[in-house]
Amino acid sequence: MGIGRRDFLKKSAALTAASLVGINLKIKTDGVTLGESASAGENLMRIPEEVKKSPAYKEEDGYTWVRGTCRFCGTGCKVWLGFRNGKPAVIRGERKSAINFGFLCMKGMLFYKLFRHPDRLTQPLYRKSKKEPFKPISWEKAYEIIADEMIKAIKKGEWTPFGWSGIAYYGSGQALTEETYLFQKLFRCIGTNHVEGNPRLCMASAVGGYLTSYGTDEPAGGYADFDKAQTVFIIGSNTAECHPILFRRIMHNKLKNPNGYMVINVDPRISPTSKIADIHMQFKPGTDLALLNAIAHVIVNEGLYNKEFVSKYCAFHIYTKGKDKVPLLGHQVSFEEYKQFLQRYTPEYAAQICGGNITPEMIRKVARRFATTRTVSIWTMGLNQRTRGVWANNLVTNLHLLTGNLCKDGADSLSLTGQPNACGGVREGGGLCHILPGHRFVKSKADRENLEKIWGVPKGTIPPKPGYHTVKMFSAITYSERDKKRFPGLKPIHFIWVEETTPMQSLPNVGHYRKGFEREDVFVVVNEIFPTRTTEFANLILPTPFHFEKTGVYGCTERRSQLTPVAVKAPGNTKPELQIIVEFAQVLAKKLRRERDPRLRARAHTVYQCVAPFIEAAKKDPWWTLAKEVWSEYAGKVTKGRDNDLSGATYEVLLARPDGVQWPAPTVEIAMKGGTLRRFVVGKDPLATEFVEKHPEYRGWKVVDYGHLHNLPTLPPESRARFWIWLRPYKGPAEPPDAEYPFYLSTGRVIDMWHSGDMTGRIPELANDYPYAWVEINPKDAQRLGINPGDLVLIETRRGRNIIPARISTDEGPMEGMVFVYWYDQEKHRMINFCTIDAYDPGSKQPEFKICACRISKYAPARPLKQFLVKLVKVKGGYLHNVEIDRAEY
Amino acid sequence: MKKEKNTKGRREFLKVTLGMFLSGALTSCDLSQLKNPRTMIKSPIRPNILRPPGAVPEEHFAQKCIRCGRCGEVCPYHSIKYFDVKEAGVFSGTPYINVMEKPCYLCMKCVYVCPTGSLVPCSKEDVRMGVAVINRQICVTWQQQKTGLMCKTCFDVCPFAGIAIKIDHDFRPYIIEENCTGCGICAYSCIADTWYENKGKKAITIMPIKWKKIKEVSLKSVKNS
């Protein structure tokens, strides 16, 4: 020790003093609380009397429990929210539920921490220009402003076949069914079909796939099939992280029967899902169509197909551009032609295209397994977020139809949804530009008139043409030269109402669309619970209640609707969306009445009529009764007689059932038993039974496809009431890698962070584990480029760039020549959607998030990074987002 | 931790005296606070309170370390802190990492700045600050039948996931003691304390071990409860 005694004394004294003072390392919250947070003795419970009397309420272990659903992901787990001393304190699973059997993942267990989070928005905030700070205003004032701006935007635009061109609504697969339904009702009554939602980004291709294959949307089976299946075919899904509860079920079955239960994972990336897979098929991104056709080739050529099922219940269809008028219908071809079409896709040819570890022998093995056992296929964004997403969906369903792996126990073609209410709210509730509630179509005159009659509004209220799909809608907001060239005849949008979603983080090529939201001539209204990347561009922020702070129904993947009753008092001055719509519509109606334009004046009555049945309830009890009345209109009247018949699923039934109701459930008796597990099977599905009784020509059929699109009178009789096998050729991605941008870029999710991370990022336990996003690089590529774990990597595409830390793992991660980035991070340099491509599927209009070309290089050595969240900061004259104060830094 | 037999030389004696003097000075000469004067020479290293990476065995550490504070200075995560005299006596001013406040992220910067070799440079994989022990009574995934939770947070955050920590087919984690560095990220991230029946207890504890005896210690003495 080269140190004197005196030095030692000095140093140790100094250090001891320093450690007594201590360094405070706690993360400071620089956000502001606008409303009051809960005081110690305050009781936060708001449980309606009706719920207290139902089985959805109990008192146990000194806690008060209320039953609802989980808000994260599309699995639809049933949860109990527990209160201690009047405050939400715990969430646990419902054991009687047929979905999760009491199991929950971390997101579900911890979301009670968001109820009184200090970042919660609790006051309507308004600013005239997007450069000014926000000022709190009253609700009445907010309604006035929205109505004025909306009328102004309508006048700026023009009347077109899809209605007023100047205004738009952008909804969410997280909004409750009642909210989506009432919002779209309001906008259709105002007279526009510019009604879209973020499900366009997540499952529009699955809608297209089911519509073309079955003639009606949504899967035929459910989660119960996992238990009876022998093979699970996972393609384009990281189930282990994105649907952990379903993965547990698959894993449980695999464990029980390791030899008889086979898991096949098809993914360019080795994910946690691959760990239980017997076969992992790793192929180049975007070559899935060739692979799926090759599997079909083996099944047909080796005679493994189910001859009875194919000849009796299937028809073959193809769409040829130029020849067929309607892409959804195409024209019929024979089985021989299908065989001829498949000849090209030999396993050898597919293996050559697919690359990776795919061998012809592997394809043959998978095809044989698929054909000879009961198989469930599951997929998510890997197939959907593609420029040929609908085709990929068709090809998976083709395999099921060829092998008869449908409409029986343990066999289904199941598209998992990512959002809790993408199926229930948006697909069924009419939250997209081309559909109306109850699986109706905007283009169909009969559907429109039927709906107008139910609503009690004049004929012709709903414009006859679909509005703009998501990419087009945001292009119409940005309205730059590029957009005008891309969509000829594009009409600009000047007003958008964004509900419970954050497009300014979740859109592909978001840098381009952020320019649109920056425009001063676009008025942006956002309903949110937290400041997000979208509220950053808002003119008006409306604070809304969180899950369990309002009442409503979520519909999950397997056509199951579940009720979440109000249980917690919403903080501050928030109002449920339903109340906002009802109150706003009355203000709007008043203003429209004073307009000079007769077309606008005529709408005043329609708008009033749209919410008239709910005005009384909105005044009296917006938290429970209002939602109940909207649901009884939607389920009881609008879905009655449709294929998603929910008229039996009243709130009483939904409260009583531990796991909701699967439609079709036309009567209360059927709904009380849980609805219909298996669609299209005569004897099990009430609609199929009814269909066969009505049409004597199908008597004796065990399975009948009653899908509306497959029973049109214009179709040849050999196509009617049958499932359709589609002939879909191979097509690669929109932007394959080239010499300049040699890597595939793909994006995804981690287990504990959900989508944009606005909610999960605010749960400290989860944020500790995943404070920032990273890029996964194959070790071989990393070695070649000299990138070490933790190094900051520069990712560049033709649209934008990211600087993001690297993670290099030998047992997980993407294949060589591909990088994988998580998209939950809100920091500007780590928001990967600046890089993704906005090319979209011509059928479903879903963008191709999963594949684009990029190049990577080492940017800087590893350095510690911090979590970043958008927050509101108090400044002189009001509130600003932290990202707005210093644009360059964030 | 087993108490070490101290070989008190002149130096040790001097340190004790100095420590007591310092402590007396800082606490207004209130020696009654030192309930047991032996705490002055007992190592303050205990579960979850660990030496930084590459530390020499604890019996030598206090002698080798000159309390220069450089390891804490370079630590980018502010994980390294220093003992104060009240709790550590002669060990005052030596560095430690409290994994429950801030774990070690194994950036390995501290080992290169240590002037006396109290922290010996080594690679990430060779760090043995301690070993993680999972309390299966507390772990929400091990208690799956009761809690219904499927947490695998510790597995997700471990820098050596799959090597130092593995999960079985029901997501239940277990530690491979030979490979555990004791960095404490798993203990820090453990969310078992949020489960209402656990009363704020975390399921993972990092037990300190003797650096050179890792091989024998691992399986025999640090068996899961």
Image (spheres, rainbow, N blue to C red):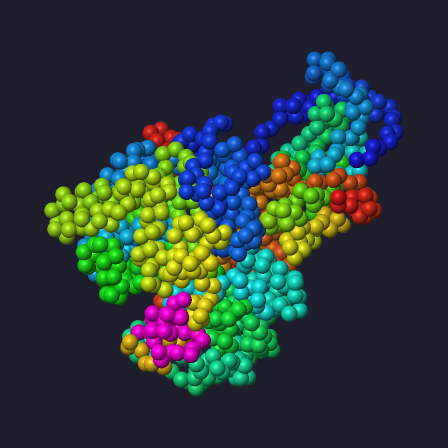
Residue B100: image quadrant is: top right
At a point 30% along the width and 59% down the height, the residue shown is A436
On screen, residue A189 versus residue A270, left or right, reads left
Q: Nearer the viewer, residue A847 or A208?
A: A208
In the picture, the quarter occupied by the C terminus of chain A is top left
Find residue B154 and report its horizontal and vertical position in percent: 64, 47
Q: Is residue A702 magenta?
A: yes
Q: Is residue A198 left or right of residue B159?
A: left
Residue A205 in view here? no
Seen at 50% across and 51% down, the residue is A658
The residue at the far front in this view is A669
Residue A380 at x, y = what percent?
48, 61
Residue A544: quadrant of the picture:
top left
Is A80 on the left-hand or right-hand side of A468? right
With respect to residue A763, does A481 lie above or below?
Answer: below
| Residue at x 71% of width, y 49% of height | B175
Residue A10 at what x, y percent from top left?
A: 71, 21
The stretch in magenta equals A686-712
Count of labels shown?
0
The answer to which of A108 and A34 lies nearer the viewer is A108
Look at 58% across and 45% down and name the residue there: A769
Q: Is residue A429 left or right of residue A827?
A: left
The answer to whether B170 is drawn above or below residue A372 in the figure is above
Q: Is residue B40 magenta?
A: no
Q: Position of residue A716 (x, y in %)?
A: 32, 81
Classify A573 as above or below A335.
above
Image quadrant where one finds the N terminus of chain A: top right
Front-most of A388 and A446?
A446
Residue B199 in view, yes or no: yes
